[in-house]
Image (tube, rainbow, N blue to C red):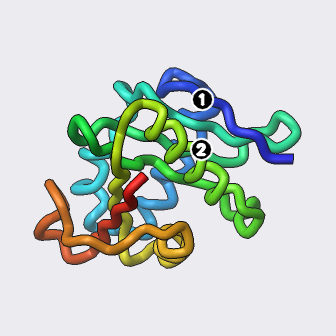
Amino acid sequence: MIYCTKTDSGNTDFQNLVRELDADLKIRDGADNAFYAQFNKIAVIKHAIVAYENKIPVGCGAIKEYSQEIAEIKRMYVPPDMRGKGIAATILASLESWAKELGYKKCILETGKRQPEAIALYKKSNYEIIPNYGQYQTVENSVCFEKKL
């Protein structure tokens, strides 16, 4: 059974999963990786989720304040051998619920066009594509989404 734990960026399991995510993104994003990496630091993330199956960490995600009413979904990752089990959807739903508890009205996020499984997850989870925001406005490889809570 999958269960999610609320934590922060000091959690070792979260840090290890993010290292795996960064290694995956380095391959997928190639030359664009350095640009994205500057926006994905985890040292100050106060709201992270780690998913577990039989006490083994199997995925993660985080929310970060974008504005007073908007939370940004960050650092979503499930290792390849654990995909297809609904873990990412469970993490995403937990993050949305937590964002709502914290008083946010909307979640936004950015993902890359080279991450088709992420795009499919967000569409399936009722996120709508929006114009690229913030630092992603002129980035051709970025796809941005939002969902009202």
142 sits to left or right of 56: left
Tell me the residue at 58%/51% (across/down).
Answer: 93
Location of residue 85 with respect to 65 vertically, above or below: below
Nearest to the observer: residue 113 or residue 95: 95
22 sits to left or right of 86: left
The residue carrying mark 1 is: 6
121 sits to left or right of 34: right
Q: Secondary structure at mark 2?
A: helix
As shown in the figure, which amino acid type bears the numbered disc 2?
Answer: Ser
- Real-space Cα separation, disc 1 to disc 2, in angstroms: 9 Å
Give residue 105's position: percent from left, percent from top: 34, 46
* Numbered disc total: 2
The residue carrying mark 2 is: 94
As shown in the figure, which amino acid type bears the numbered disc 1?
Answer: Lys
- Which numbered disc, 1 or 2, marks the residue closer to the eye? 2
1 and 2 marks in contact (CB < 8 Å): yes
Which label belongs to residue 135? Answer: none
Give residue 28's position: percent from left, percent from top: 43, 70
Tell me the residue at 71%/47% (across/down).
Answer: 58
Tell me the residue at 54%/33% (across/down).
Answer: 15
